[in-house]
Amino acid sequence: MARASAGARLHFGFCNLSLSHERLYGALGVGLAAPRVVVDAESASAVSVTVDGATGGSPEPTDAATEVRDDVREYATAAVDLLGVDGARVAVRESLPRHAGLGSGTQLAAATLAAVAAAHGEPARVRERAPALGRGGRSGVGVATFEAGGFVLDAGHPTARFTTDRPADGEWTVPPVAARHAVPDDWRFLLVEPEADAGRSGAAEDDAMRTAVERAEPGLADRIGGIVTRRVLPAVATGNAEAFGAAVAEIGRLNGAWYADEQGGVYRPPVGEVVDSLSGAAPVFGAGQSSWGPTVYGVTDAAHADAARDAGERALDAAGVGGEVSVARASNEGARTDAGNGAESPSADPERGNTKPRGDGA
């Protein structure tokens, strides 16, 4: 039995959405040690998929488990075809919240490919094959953090390749990594996951992104470029969590101006209220919306982690919503793949801190 395990990722935003500049997108993000995706696979004559904990005590799978199973069946079928093998029995042991801003789709697709490949003794070549799985078309952060973790800035795509219609799966390449830095060991990331509708995905996400690109103000990209080069990269290189948090939070606000018409504001409701509360909390060095949300991130460190978690709980109270609050380490080593023969690639410590489910604003 082969196993692939990968942590979530945070997405801080893009460097450019304007067609007036030479390169489009260019995403910033960081790999997390937890929560994680865990996928097992073994060789078989056909493709079959099961999802652990799928029923919640009911004889029928939950809606979320059914969606995960259906997605993994597509990924596994594509993986089998790409690898030129007969089939695989795939079991999803752990999965990320779907469409919550944590990279669930890319991490699940990549882990499925890696597990199936390992079960057959084949190289996964995730970066090369991710487009055939429908992943890595705009942001390269998910693939890059799966490969090696850390803080990642990808190079985006040539603007001349932009099309109003979504290209077919496989008709793009994953953006190359322009810069990567290991995240300091004492940095932590507050995760506040409010009870809210899932973020955009699939065709709805494609439509929203293309609308945003066609309307994007080019001046925002110039401002973001200055923040990236003069603030974000120096902060992560020197280990300054306070400066890093403030810089990525500002990038998130500027990205939100591009998306305001598509998501009902700089942040999607109720994310804005949570971000506002965290932005005024001393133990949180910067806060924002990860991807389309609803997950809110906060940058902090080990010394302030408990106080940051308390601030996250107060932020949910102030917004009048339930949710979960946790603190995660970064991962600097990417995914772990075990071929079932005792050989296992190194991986970050999956410590996440205490996770506290909450009621409706209680």
Image (spheres, helix red, strand yellow):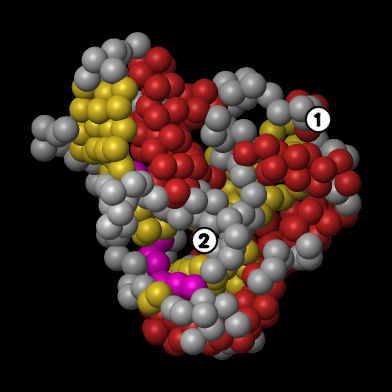
Looking at the image, which residue is at 21% across and 27% down?
Answer: 42
Does the magenta portion include 120?
A: no
Does the magenta portion include 329?
A: yes
Establish if 37 lies above or below 130: below
Q: Give the number of the disc on residue 196.
A: none
Q: Secondary structure at mark 2?
A: helix
Residue type pointed to by label 1: Thr
Q: Position of residue 114 (x, y in %)?
A: 33, 32
The answer to whether residue 212 is seen in the rendering is: yes
Give the residue furthest to the left.
342
Q: Give the number of the disc on residue 237.
A: 2
Q: Mark 1 Cα within 10 Å, few/some/many (few <14, many 20+)?
A: few
Q: In this rendered view, identify the residue nearer to me: 204 or 11.
A: 204
Looking at the image, which residue is at 43% across and 35% down?
Answer: 70
Q: Position of residue 31 (x, y in %)?
A: 45, 54
Q: Position of residue 200 (x, y in %)?
A: 64, 49
Q: Which residues are magenta?
A: 323-335
Q: In this rendered view, identify the residue nearer to me: 260 or 128.
A: 260
**Left or right: where 221 falls relative to 193:** right
**Left or right: where 33 falls relative to 298:** left
Dot in front, 2 or 1 = 1
- Disc 2 versus disc 1: distance between alpha carbons? 37 Å
Q: Give the number of the disc on residue 164.
A: 1
Q: Mark 2 Cα within 10 Å, few/some/many (few <14, many 20+)?
A: some
**Left or right: where 362 falls relative to 13:** left
Establish if 76 lies above or below 276: above
